[in-house]
Image (cartoon, coloured by chain):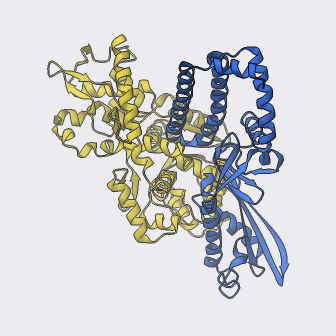
């Protein structure tokens, strides 16, 4: 940037302008805080639409910040064209070289805001991490795993990676419960007991179908692999439902004397109980 | 108009501050105030005549507590279809307090007039085995119980002369246990195999019916389902006005009783906020009531919304318990224990806690005094809240 342009740029700034810019930034922050609080209040009022409501905030935040920056440049600073071109060129070069990854993440964040891969509140899997999306920022996405860890994933990674989305904006989601059971249990009864036991779980969303499938597997000896698929009423109860359904199926089998301690010892094969 | 706008502008920051601080919003009625209303000093300070007129239950024909135009018409059509030889079966369901049992009783009057043989069989205890189901059905039908084999049951019912068989309180069929599917399958088989001879009509609470249908597919054995809608705003308004008239009042807010057409008036607003629940309307009337300039005039203030913060503070097990009570109609501690697989003491603690909070009551009117039911005055509010968080669907 030559001296002439730099002098022009300095001449543009004044205390009034600086104060105006601060006022705009402060106002935007208040508006965003109010918006966040309003959405939070609405979520409390309509918890069923938690995911849909939470999704609106990242989009609105990008729109508001972009509009404010445009307003600051064109409405407050209002620089001459030569300064704009020179500044943009220099800024672009500097920023481009210094922060390739950051820019990539921000661009990815903007793309995701308008073409979302998932919403805040969805249960997603990114690589080996699986958890609830708790925030969609401009450059990163945060997940809360079932171990209560927060995983921060750069947005550019999300655009380039396969993502699994368990509920896709809905409150209920499909939960898979797998059990490994001894082959001494009669197949006919096993499936019907499993389905009936799954229906008894208060976490199960009965409006959607429950299925049970059976396969045989061999590891040292033959055993059945029972897979029960049912929907949970709220994504946050996924693990609770898995545990509850597993316990109910085993209890039901034991109550019907289809599975006794001699045929199946939970303490002996803990890793085979639920995978 | 400007005055009203000014009031709202003045009130708004106070409301926002209250929400931020988590304080109680004075512009709303706390739910625990509603649940304890009939035990409050204020209620007991009201005149006996007023309390009697606003008694939270049906006041005979004056109330017109059933939607006769729709409910009875649906059943009359069912009768015509059956008489024309159609093999149909019918289910009527509606929210607690919408007058399902009253509807079936009114219908029996119609059948009596036409000399049509019928049986009204109310389930009054939880049915958990095929034997208890068959015994409950056979005794009023005059059939001797010999076996639980499905063919024998169907054959015995089919040997009866054609009649209308009405089953009330079908929520007692719901039980979240591993045996439920087989019981519902037996029930469905009986209905399907005998409906060419008999006209089956069942009445069930709405949430129970949804559970029976979504969970066990009971709706597949009924050719027609009728949702008894909640009371309309107009119906509730007329009923409340009739209650004021019954209490001896002739003007409301300075206007002759029943003449106000102003939709912004308190009586319209009360009908709107009652969410189709008469008991809530009765509460609003008494809570917003003051005597007017003379003893025959009444002044009603604008009703406030009900604050559900109390429900939001409940834990998962409490909310699941409320949801299961809605779907089962009522629960004993033992049934609660079986559903949630907790200790009996834990079940008692949860149910008693909800009773102390005023959300549940003991079933004093029914046979099962140890069972807990949802308090009618808050049922509409609780059900809507549970639907909003997906615990009911």
Left or right, residue B64 beside residue B185: left
Q: Residue at x 23, y 22 (%)?
A: B299
Q: Position of residue B173 (x, y in %)?
A: 54, 57
Q: Which of B146 and B265 is in front in this view?
A: B265
Q: Where is residue B77 in the image (x, y as percent from the top left)?
A: 59, 33
Question: Which chain is displayed in yellow in the rendered image?
Answer: B
Q: Nearer the viewer, residue B114 or B283?
A: B283
Extreme residue in the top direction? B1
Extreme residue in the left direction? B294
Q: Which residue is drawn at 75% across and 74% down?
A: A180
**Numbered circles on residues, count:** 0
Apparent colour of chain A: blue
Kindly tell me whether residue B181 is visible in this rendering: no
Q: Nearer the viewer, residue B114 or A215?
A: A215
Q: Where is residue B28 in the image (x, y as percent from the top left)?
A: 35, 34
Left or right, residue A147 beside residue B387: right
Extreme residue in the front direction? A3
Kindly tell me whether residue A102 is visible in this rendering: yes
Q: Say if A62 sits above or below B340 in the image.
A: above
Res A14 → quadrant = top right
Q: Position of residue A73 (x, y in %)?
A: 67, 21
Q: Say if B65 sits above or below A144 in the image.
A: above
The N terminus of chain B is located in which quarter? top left
Res A270 → quadrant = bottom right
Q: Which residue is drawn at 82% across and 50% down?
A: A161
């Amino acid at each position: 940037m030559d001296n002439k342009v730099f002098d022009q740029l300095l001449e543009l700034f004044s205390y009034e302008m600086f104060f105006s810019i601060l006022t705009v930034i402060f106002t935007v922050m208040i508006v965003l805080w109010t918006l966040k609080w309003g959405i939070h209040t609405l979520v409390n009022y309509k918890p069923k639409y938690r995911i849909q409501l939470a999704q609106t905030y990242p989009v609105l935040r990008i729109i508001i910040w972009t509009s404010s920056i445009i307003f600051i440049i064109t409405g407050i600073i209002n620089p001459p064209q030569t300064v704009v071109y020179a500044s943009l060129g220099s800024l672009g070069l500097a920023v481009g070289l210094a922060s390739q990854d950051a820019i990539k993440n921000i661009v990815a964040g903007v793309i995701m805001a308008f073409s979302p891969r998932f919403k805040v509140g969805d249960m997603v899997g990114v690589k080996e991490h699986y958890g609830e999306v708790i925030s969609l920022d401009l450059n990163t996405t945060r997940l809360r795993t079932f171990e209560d860890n927060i995983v921060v994933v750069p947005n550019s990674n999300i655009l380039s990676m396969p993502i699994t989305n368990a509920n896709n904006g809905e409150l209920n989601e499909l939960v898979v419960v797998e059990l490994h059971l001894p082959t001494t249990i009669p197949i006919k009864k096993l499936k019907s007991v499993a389905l009936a036991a799954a229906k008894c779980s208060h976490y199960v969303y009965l409006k959607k179908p429950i299925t049970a499938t059976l396969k045989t597997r061999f590891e040292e000896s033959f055993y059945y692999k029972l897979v029960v698929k049912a929907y949970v009423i709220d994504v946050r109860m996924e693990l609770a439902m898995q545990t509850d359904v597993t316990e109910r199926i085993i209890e039901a089998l034991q109550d019907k004397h289809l599975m006794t301690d001699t045929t199946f010892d939970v303490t002996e094969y803990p890793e085979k109980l639920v995978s | 108009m400007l005055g009203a706008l000014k009031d709202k502008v003045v009130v708004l920051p106070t409301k926002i501050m209250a929400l931020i601080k988590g304080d109680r919003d004075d512009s709303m009625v706390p739910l625990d105030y509603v649940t304890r209303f009939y035990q409050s000093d204020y209620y007991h300070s009201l005149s006996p005549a007023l309390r009697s007129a606003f008694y939270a239950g049906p006041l005979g024909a004056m109330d017109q507590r059933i939607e006769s135009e729709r409910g009875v018409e649906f059943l009359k059509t069912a009768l015509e279809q059956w008489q024309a030889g159609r093999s149909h079966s019918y289910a009527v369901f509606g929210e607690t307090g919408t007058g399902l049992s009253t509807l079936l009783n009114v219908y029996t009057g119609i059948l009596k007039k036409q000399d049509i043989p019928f049986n009204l069989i109310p389930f009054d205890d939880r049915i958990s085995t095929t034997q208890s189901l068959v015994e409950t059905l056979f005794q009023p039908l005059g059939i001797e119980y010999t076996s639980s084999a499905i063919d024998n049951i169907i054959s015995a019912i089919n040997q009866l002369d054609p009649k209308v068989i009405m089953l009330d309180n079908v929520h007692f069929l719901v039980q979240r246990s591993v045996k439920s599917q087989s019981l519902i399958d037996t029930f469905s088989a009986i209905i399907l195999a005998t409906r060419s001879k008999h006209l089956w009509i069942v009445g069930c609470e709405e949430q129970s019916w949804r559970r029976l249908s979504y969970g066990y597919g009971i709706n597949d054995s009924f050719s027609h389902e009728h949702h008894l809608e909640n009371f309309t705003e107009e119906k509730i308004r007329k009923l409340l006005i009739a209650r004021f008239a019954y209490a001896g009042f002739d003007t409301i807010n300075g206007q002759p009783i029943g003449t106000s057409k102003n939709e912004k008036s308190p009586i319209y607003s009360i009908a709107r906020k009652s969410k189709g629940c008469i008991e809530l309307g009765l509460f609003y009337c008494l809570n917003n009531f003051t005597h007017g300039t003379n003893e025959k005039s009444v002044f009603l203030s604008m009703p406030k919304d009900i604050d559900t913060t109390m429900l939001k503070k409940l834990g998962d097990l409490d909310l699941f318990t409320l949801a299961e009570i809605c779907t089962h109609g009522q629960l004993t501690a033992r049934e609660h224990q079986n559903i949630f697989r907790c200790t009996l003491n834990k079940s008692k603690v949860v149910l008693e806690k909800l009773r102390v909070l005023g959300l549940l009551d003991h079933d004093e009117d029914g046979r099962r005094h140890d069972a807990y039911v949802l308090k009618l005055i808050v049922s509409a509010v609780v059900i809507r809240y549970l639907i909003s968080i997906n615990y009911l669907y």
